[in-house]
Amino acid sequence: MKDEVFRRFVDRVIKKSDNVGAMAKLERFIKSDDIIPACTVVEALLPPYLKERQRKCFYVVAGLFACHHSDCRKGNLGKTVSLLSFSDTSAERRFLRLLGADSDEIFDMLFSVITQAKSKNISVNYERLLHDLIYWGDKIKHQWARSFYRSEVEETV
């Protein structure tokens, strides 16, 4: 899948951010897995050729955005968590649990990371997050780990 697909989707979700009703439906989905109301928002934004797991990735990213509207277009979630770790000593432990998650478990773990980012006013690269969820595996996990630990090294140097 091309990066343009991810960018286009996230841009469309961002355009909906002023629609309180749409954001409420997406947030309800991410908090309770109530997909039916979210369908009225997300389905019109999706590319037509998605497999079921890919479709879930798009839904999850839209729901996470609804919980925290602060989007940036650089870095990955490893970098985001590293920014959280400066004020939270248990961040590394939670990050390692994220890295240990399989392709289904990762979805359930993201909500707490995003709400923590919101509480610290740290932006999230939703376009990259969508890409990483679609391609979740060892390569993405290593990229997140490099971003997380390099950020730590940069701060101590």
Image (cartoon, rainbow, N blue to C red):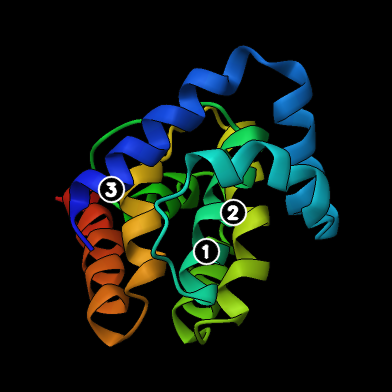
Q: Amino acid at mark 3?
A: Val
Question: From what the image shows, is residue 107 above or below residue 110?
Answer: below
* Residue 30 location (% of width, % of height): 73, 52
- Between the residue at mark 1 and the residue at mark 3, the CA separation in whole angstroms equals 13 Å
Q: Is residue 77 visible?
A: no
Q: Kindly state the secondary structure of the residue where label 1 is placed.
A: helix
* Residue 45 location (% of width, % of height): 49, 39
Tell me the number on the disc at residue 5.
3
Give the side of residue 20 with respect to residue 152, left or right: right
In the image shown, does 16 or 147 lie closer to the viewer? 16
Q: Is residue 74 visible?
A: yes
Q: Quadrant of residue 149?
A: bottom left
Q: Kindly state the secondary structure of the residue where label 2 is placed.
A: helix
* Residue 89 location (% of width, % of height): 56, 59
Question: From what the image shows, is residue 99 above or below residue 34?
Answer: below
**Residue at the image position 42 percent from the left and 56 percent from the top:** 48
In which quadrant is the N terminus drawn? bottom left
- Between the residue at mark 3 and the residue at mark 2, the CA separation in whole angstroms equals 14 Å
Give the side of residue 128 with respect to residue 91, left or right: left
Q: Quadrant of residue 23?
A: top right
**Marks 1 and 2: CB-CB under 8 Å?**
yes
**Residue at the image position 29 percent from the left and 39 percent from the top:** 7
Question: From what the image shows, is residue 3 above or below residue 105?
Answer: above
Q: Kindly state the secondary structure of the residue where label 3 is placed.
A: helix
Sequence-wise first label, 3 or 2: 3
In the picture of the structure, the residue carrying the numbered disc 1 is 55
In the image shown, does 151 or 20 lie closer to the viewer? 20
**Residue at the image position 65 percent from the left and 36 percent from the top:** 41
* Residue 73 location (% of width, % of height): 26, 34
